[in-house]
Amino acid sequence: MDFNFTEHEREEAWTWLHEQLENYYKNPKGVQAAPTLDIHSIQQHVGRFSFDHALPVQGALEHVLDGMRQYTVHTPHPGYYGLYNPRPAFPGILADTITATFNPQLAAWSHAPFANEVENYLIRQFGVKFGFPKERIDGVFTSGGAEANLTALLTAINHRHPDYGTSGLRGLDKQPILYCSEESHHSVAKAAKNMGLGSHNVRSIPTNSNFQMRADLLEENLAADLKNGLDPFLIVATAGTTGTGVMDPLKEIGSLAAKRNLWFHVDAAYGGAIALVEKYSHLLNGLEQADSITFDAHKWLSNPMSTSLYITRHKDILSRTFGMDTDYMPKEGAHMAITDPYAHSIQWSRRFIGLRLYLSLLIFGWRGYEKVITHQVQMGQRLKELLLEDHWKVYNDTDLPVLCFGKPEFETDDKLALQVCSTVLASGKAWISVYRAGAVNGLRACITNYDTQEEDLKELVETLRQAQPFQD
């Protein structure tokens, strides 16, 4: 078969595939929220065809769709209460189709000027929403929050040590140290490993009874490290922690970072979206003090995976950190006041991921997102009410729609949460997870789907009730 297909073959494939995808999209409860994890069956399905013989187009598509239906956690399902993976809004799906068809290469500005300026515009727009002065905003789209956090570590150490890019860690006369809370995303420690800093040089600061970083212990650790001749260079706070959805005391931590002349990074991958809702934007007080911010549009803004942003108030730091001169990269834009993305980012070749967010904002606007975020917050509050009415204990306290909960029995038997969770998953009606909230191995549910309604919450609570191996 010709790689282009014939016009008739393309039309036939599009028509058939559209019907299948539309059926899935309009009826996400037509599949079980969680798959049965049988590695033998999954591998057998994947390896059913050897590639020695070509399949008909529809046969190949059927094979792939069957695999996706059977062996995927279905994040578009309204009973998915998981790890900030949303039901994607339709404009994001359209955007991915456009991007795949045009296939722009964003490494060189001149090869994709529209795409690059769309992403630059979005960086500035979100920087303003987060409180940065418009004229000082810079940033880049990343493959995910992990890359954005790695970018933060690299920009922070290059800011602290301008020769780091050439001399490396061995060229420093003191050991660099960074700080984050014990509730921070593990991508921070992973980034320290990846850049050669080492996870032992990441100080994990204890949290208070509501799982927020303790600024007093942070200051104590800083003072001790300075006394011991070490080189603190970065504090990472979290706005919407992965497990419990709480906000670290950004204002207090930011003031401490400024006092000690340290780079202040806020991982607002999830919670940053609350800035779009005026009623709740005060929860992010102090975010404007940050030197850099991680934000994931594939979380609360319902973009397809993965759509992330790194935003900074330091206009030149990305170019100083990632700048490169090459002979072979296109030079058509050299006479313009532009920056080629390959010299501005960890990545080189890069997909136009910003179109998902741009097209969504063109269609929904800020008000559309304010409405859907408010709905999810309200659903989180309603789920908390339903859980308390059913005699569950909620362990975290946050305005964001993240619930960590359990029964008194959980406090004496770590296996009970796992048992309840497994039963819920096996029902196919919902996907929840297990999370240790302090000393208790509890359950965790997060509203990530704009289509999740009160009847879905009631179904979850009923499913939890039936999954209990004990009596109330």
Image (cartoon, grey):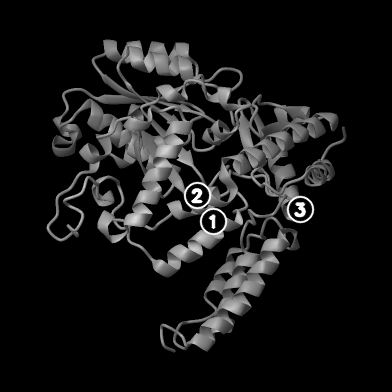
Query: Where on the picture, by quarter, is residue 394?
Result: top right
Indicate the position of residue 24 as horizontal and vertical percent values. Answer: 68, 65
In-image side of 274 versus 195 (left or right)? right
Residue type for callout 2 = Leu
Between tags 1 and 3, which lies in front? Answer: 1
Residue at horizontal 85%, vertical 30%?
A: 389
Question: Label 2 near label 1: C-beta < 8 Å?
Answer: yes
Q: Tag 2, which secondary structure?
A: helix
Q: Earlier in the sequence, mark 1 or mark 3?
A: 1
Q: Tag 3, which secondary structure?
A: loop
In the picture of the structure, the residue carrying the numbered disc 1 is: 92
Q: Earlier in the sequence, mark 2 or mark 3?
A: 2
Between tags 2 and 3, which lies in front? Answer: 2
In the figure, 268 relative to 433: above or below? above
In the picture of the structure, the residue carrying the numbered disc 3 is: 429
Indicate the position of residue 286 as horizontal and vertical percent values. Answer: 47, 20
In-image side of 43 versus 236 (left or right)? right
Residue at horizontal 52%, vertical 75%?
A: 47
Query: What is the C-alpha distance between the residues marked 2 and 3?
Result: 30 Å
**Quadrant for the C terminus in the image:** top right
Mark 2 neighbour class, 10 Å CA radius: few under 14, some 14 to 19, many 20 or more: many
Query: Where on the picture, by quarter, is residue 405?
Result: top right
Q: Tag 1, which secondary structure?
A: helix
- Residue at the extreme right of the image, as rendered: 471
Indicate the position of residue 88 as horizontal and vertical percent values. Answer: 59, 54
Residue at horizontal 49%, vertical 33%?
A: 268
Mark 3 neighbour class, 10 Å CA radius: few under 14, some 14 to 19, many 20 or more: many
Q: Front-most of 146 and 416?
A: 146
Mark 1 neighbour class, 10 Å CA radius: few under 14, some 14 to 19, many 20 or more: many
In the picture of the structure, the residue carrying the numbered disc 2 is: 357
Query: What is the C-alpha distance between the residues marked 1 and 2?
Result: 7 Å
Indicate the position of residue 254 as horizontal and vertical percent values. Answer: 41, 18
